[in-house]
Amino acid sequence: MADRPGPDAAPLAERLRARGLRLTTQRTQVLAAVAALEHATPEAIGARLREEAGPDGAAPDTSTVYRNLELLERLGLVWHTHLGKGAPVYHAFEHPHLHVVCQVCGGIDSVDPHLLDAAAERLTADLGFRLDIGHVALSGTCRSCRATEETP
């Protein structure tokens, strides 16, 4: 998981003000942690914030992280995806992608969401079903694990 600079607080501030809410330090910190960690559980986000705060600093507790993630998702700034068992992972909305998860090693790759365009169109045409690509995670076996399995 690569560190990236934190997101600009302007979209967050604008969306909060439109709903009569304030831009708080905790909301800004949670959004920045999501952007930096890419695919992080609420627990990992909280751990990062505690690490950043240091031993004498204040960091939001886990329930505050969850509440802020829910708000940020309602505002359209983050998405969550269930990659299998366990807590959902969060990622920034401005980087939409589809997830593929290896059932053997647990590796996660992000791929272009347009990969499923034909399937999404077919689901809409046949069933009237609109696919939410942001929440899609496909599971299978990655190239590396397949190669290991095929080696005698």
Image (cartoon, grey):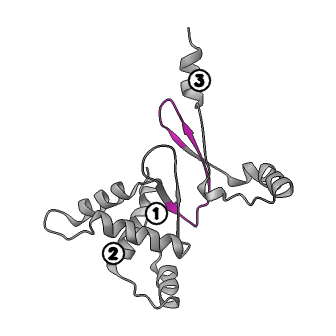
Asked if residue 65 lies left or right of residue 51, the reply is: right
| Residue 51 lies in quadrant | bottom left
Mark 2 residue crowding within 10 angstroms, few (<14) / some (14–19) / many (20+) = some
Task: Sort mark 3 into few (<14), some (14-19) or many (20+) by Cα contacts within 10 Å.
Answer: few
Q: Outermost residue, left direction? A: 56
- Residue 57: give x, y in percent of width and height: 18, 69
In the picture, the disc for residue 35 is 1
Amino acid type assigned to the residue bearing label 2 in the image: Gln
Please say if the residues under marks 3 and 1 sit with CB atoms less than 8 Å apart. no
Q: Going 51% across and 70% down the picture, which residue do you hit?
A: 73
Can you identify the residue that label 3 sits on? 146
- Amino acid under disc 3: Arg
Closer to the observer: label 2 or label 1? 2
Separation (CA) of disc 2 from disc 3: 42 Å
Give the secondary structure at mark 2.
Answer: helix
Which region shows up in magenta?
91-108
What separation in Å lies between label 2 and label 1 (alpha carbons)? 14 Å
Marks 3/1: CA–CA distance: 31 Å
Residue that carries the numbered disc 2 in the rendered image: 26
Residue 46 at x, y percent in the picture: 31, 61
